[in-house]
Image (cartoon, rainbow, N blue to C red):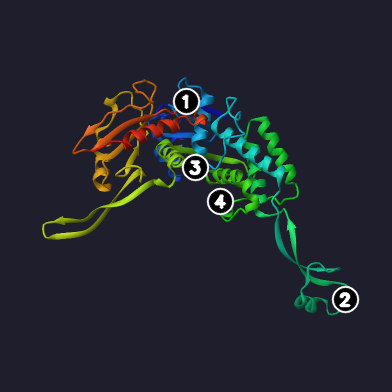
């Protein structure tokens, strides 16, 4: 397996053009064509991070700004933490503190999470389901099925048709876990992870091996007693949804686990603010902007909506709007005027004078006081705070939440 490791917006080494042609078609089939820019004999990454395997080549893409020292372990730790704080992955980072201690790829870390969380859950409780059985037995079990008993046993009094509940572990949830474990054990190259997957398959020795589809996973509803399986089930869904598997030997032909940092940054900020302010925080607030288009006497019915990223209500005399921008800015000059115009439009539509443009903090330290750059623009009492959030620290400590709170409070206390 050839491995290529890149950062965001970096060029790859020279690649075979036949590979690039098929790779581009593969990405288009997954609606991931924006993840790379294609040139004559190489590719350039964009804002997508993660791992993709295709035709014997693994391409790993890491974020640029999740570590001050380009420490791969911290980058992966912070990326996993951000994903765990969003709806991208239902994973709990606690208990897996050392999972990226080696130079594992992003995909190996996710496989390790799956194996670790599933094995821990199985050692606590193997999912069982009651299934209604209707069988002709030599003894009474459950209740007698009189209709079938008369039909089949009128001349054979040695048997009795019975209806009963059978408490079985050979159910669809366990079949999903067995199938995914059997596929991942062929994908992983980490012996510790493979041993955990072997232990899982040993536990599932009596469970039927069945090829699993995304449709089968989506039909699963975990019972209250099965909530400990939420993490491995979400990861199983992730692997199946983003991969193609050989029909003959059940090996991965290709897999693409890529996440757009624009979406991840927005969702991470939203969920972090939700932890601080609760129900006062709303995401992707939608409101009508235009009702119709008028061309002289001709009025065409038309409605255009606008969406702002994050709203915080009931903190101030007007809503606070936060527009996240995943862009690296090294000085105020790097801030796009279009970003300013966009949030000014939000101000008009949502009737707010308290606005925040939030960027991730780059390495150059032009940040003031609490870790964000502040510049207040005035336009008819309109206040736009330009702030940056430090994502290069160890995010597990949640110190960034203090920075977020300070940014919001700075805006909240503006008096008109």
Q: Secondary structure at mark 3?
A: loop
Of circles 3 and 4, which is in front?
A: 3
Tell me which numbered mark, 1 or 3, is placed earlier along the sequence: 3
Q: Tell me: residue 174, above or below residue 186.
A: below
Tell me if residue 333 can be seen: yes
* Left-right relation of 170 to 396: right
Quadrant housing residue 137: bottom right
The residue located at (36%, 29%) in the rendering is 388
Q: Which mark is residue 393?
A: 1
The residue located at (26%, 37%) in the rendering is 415
Tell me which numbered mark, 1 or 4, is placed earlier along the sequence: 4
Tell me which numbered mark, 1 or 2, is placed earlier along the sequence: 2
The residue located at (40%, 33%) in the rendering is 404
> Counting other residues with Cα less than 10 Å from the Cα at mark 1, is it few (<14), some (14-19), or many (20 or more)?
some
Tell me which numbered mark, 3 or 2, is placed earlier along the sequence: 3
Residue, disc 4? 214
Q: CA distance from mark 1 to mark 4?
A: 37 Å
Q: CA distance from mark 4 to mark 2?
A: 47 Å
Residue, disc 3? 88
Q: Percent from the top left, x then y, of residue 346?
A: 27, 44
Q: CA distance from mark 3 to mark 2?
A: 59 Å
Of 412 and 339, nearer the camera is 412
Of circles 3 and 2, which is in front?
A: 3
Q: CA distance from mark 1 to mark 2?
A: 76 Å
Number of residue marks: 4
Q: Secondary structure at mark 4?
A: helix
Residue positioned most to the right: 158
Residue, disc 2? 157
Of circles 1 and 4, which is in front?
A: 1
Of 287 and 280, nearer the camera is 280
């Amino acid at each position: 397996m050839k491995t290529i490791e890149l950062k965001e917006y970096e060029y790859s080494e020279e690649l075979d053009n036949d590979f690039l042609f098929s790779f581009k078609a593969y990405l288009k089939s997954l609606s991931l064509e924006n993840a790379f820019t294609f040139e004559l004999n190489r590719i350039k990454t964009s804002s997508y991070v993660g791992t993709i395997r295709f035709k014997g080549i693994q391409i790993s893409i890491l974020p640029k700004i999740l570590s001050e020292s380009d420490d791969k372990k911290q980058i992966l730790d912070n990326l996993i933490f951000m994903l765990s704080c969003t709806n991208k992955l239902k994973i709990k980072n606690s208990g897996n503190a050392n999972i990226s201690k080696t130079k594992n790829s992003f995909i190996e870390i996710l496989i390790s999470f799956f194996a670790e969380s599933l094995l821990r859950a199985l050692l606590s409780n193997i999912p069982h389901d009651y299934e209604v059985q209707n069988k002709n037995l030599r003894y009474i079990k459950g209740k007698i099925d009189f209709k079938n008993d008369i039909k089949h046993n009128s001349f054979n009094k040695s048997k009795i048709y019975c209806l009963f509940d059978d408490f079985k572990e050979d159910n669809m949830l366990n079949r999903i876990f067995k199938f995914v474990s059997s596929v991942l054990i062929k994908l992983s190259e980490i012996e510790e992870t493979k041993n955990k997957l072997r232990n899982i398959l040993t536990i599932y020795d009596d469970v039927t091996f069945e090829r699993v589809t995304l449709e089968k996973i989506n039909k699963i509803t975990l019972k209250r007693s099965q909530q400990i399986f939420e993490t491995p089930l979400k990861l199983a869904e992730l692997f199946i949804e983003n991969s193609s598997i050989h029909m003959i030997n059940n090996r991965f032909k290709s897999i693409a686990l890529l996440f757009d940092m624009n979406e991840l940054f927005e969702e991470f900020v939203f969920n972090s603010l939700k932890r601080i302010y609760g129900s006062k925080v709303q995401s992707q607030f939608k409101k009508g902007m235009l009702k119709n288009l008028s061309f002289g006497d001709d009025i065409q019915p038309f409605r255009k909506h606008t969406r702002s990223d994050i709203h915080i209500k009931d903190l101030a005399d007007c809503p606070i709007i936060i527009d996240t921008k995943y862009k690296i800015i090294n000085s105020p000059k790097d801030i796009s005027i279009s970003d300013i115009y966009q949030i000014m439009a939000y101000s008009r539509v949502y009737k707010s004078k308290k606005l925040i443009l939030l960027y991730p903090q780059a390495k150059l330290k032009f940040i003031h006081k609490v870790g964000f750059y502040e510049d207040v623009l005035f336009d008819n009492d309109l206040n736009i705070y330009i702030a940056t959030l430090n994502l290069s620290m160890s995010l597990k400590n949640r110190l960034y939440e203090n920075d977020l709170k300070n940014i919001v409070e700075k805006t909240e206390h503006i008096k008109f």
